[in-house]
Image (tube, grey):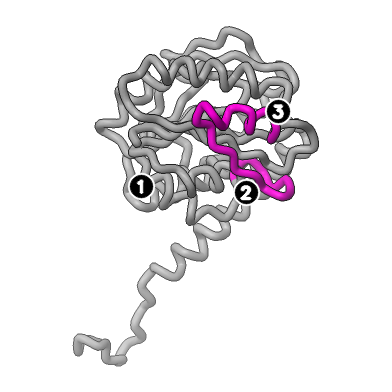
Amino acid sequence: MKLSVVIPAFNEGARLGPSLERVLAYLATRAEPSEVIVVDDGSGDDTAAVAAAFAERGVRLVRLPENRGKGAALGAGVAVSRGARVLLCDADLSTPIEEVERLEEQLAGSEIVIGSRSIAASEITVRQPRFREWMGRVFNRILRLVGLASFRDTQCGFKLLRGEVARELFAALRIERFAFDVELLWLAQRRGLRIAEVGVRWADSAGSRVHPVRDSLNMLLDVLALRWRAWREEGRRRPRAVPPGVETPNGTGD
């Protein structure tokens, strides 16, 4: 299996069908085996039924019994993926599926390639509301707390990872909701993985599942918790000073 497309879905019954049609039509043009995995994140609508209707066309459905968050949903899908490459893709296709080709061009020299709406090569066809753009800029400044200031856009839902890297990183994630992207990139940096940021086409979709105030606050709390975790881990790795006159295991000391 060359490519796994993992799509998290929460109450996406109205949009999921057309999106899957487009994804499958595109994948049919590629001369390589691929799979599509939809993860129903405890939806209250017919999301699961819509995905199940595509089973004969190879779409795999993973169901979470309750809503746990986008990070948890993606983690469940990545865990059962079989592809040498794993694409994370939003159910509304705000980034067209065809844009995966831009990311694939960079994967040869990286372990992770993230789609970006904020660098020169990006193309925004329908903009977000101004307050969401402003909140995104504020959030990017906050990311300096965890050493991710070099990335212009961590929250775009379009990301491509080498398969084994994706499965390893998602197995280690603790954050289950929207700030999972931050932890994903933080873990990747700590492991010395190469991350490329590539401009993509993107259009805002009506009916966003993001609650501007509540989810922004929760993301901030998750980032602060991640910063605390980083401080603790850095403290454990830092060598302790040896008091004068105390012998060390290699026999040195003042």
Q: Which mark is residue 164?
A: 1
Residue assigned mark 2: 176
Q: CA distance from mark 2 to mark 1?
A: 20 Å
Query: Judging from the image, what secondary structure is the residue with disc 3 in?
Result: loop
Residue range highlighted in magenta: 48-71
Element under disc 2: loop
- Characterize the local packing of mark 3: few (<14), some (14-19) or many (20 or more) Cα atoms within 10 angstroms: many
Residue behind mark 3: 12
Q: Is residue 77 above or below residue 95?
A: below
At label 1, the amino acid type is Glu
Residue 50 falls inside the magenta stretch: yes
Residue 92 spot, x, y in % from top left: 63, 22
Relative depth, front residue between 56 and 139: 56
N-terminal label among 3 and 1: 3
User: Is residue 147 visible to the viewer in this orientation of the structure?
Assistant: no
Relative vertical location of residue 178 with respect to residue 250 in this rendering, above or below: above
**Residue 203: x and y, percent?**
60, 13
Specify whether residue 31 is painted magenta.
no
Tag 2: residue type? Answer: Glu
Residue at screen point 25% across, 33% down: 109
- Which badge, 3 or 2, is on the more N-terminal residue? 3
Q: Is residue 208 left or right of residue 51?
A: right
Between disc 3 and disc 2, the foreground one is 3
Q: How far across and down, in percent of the image, does residue 4 sit?
A: 43, 34
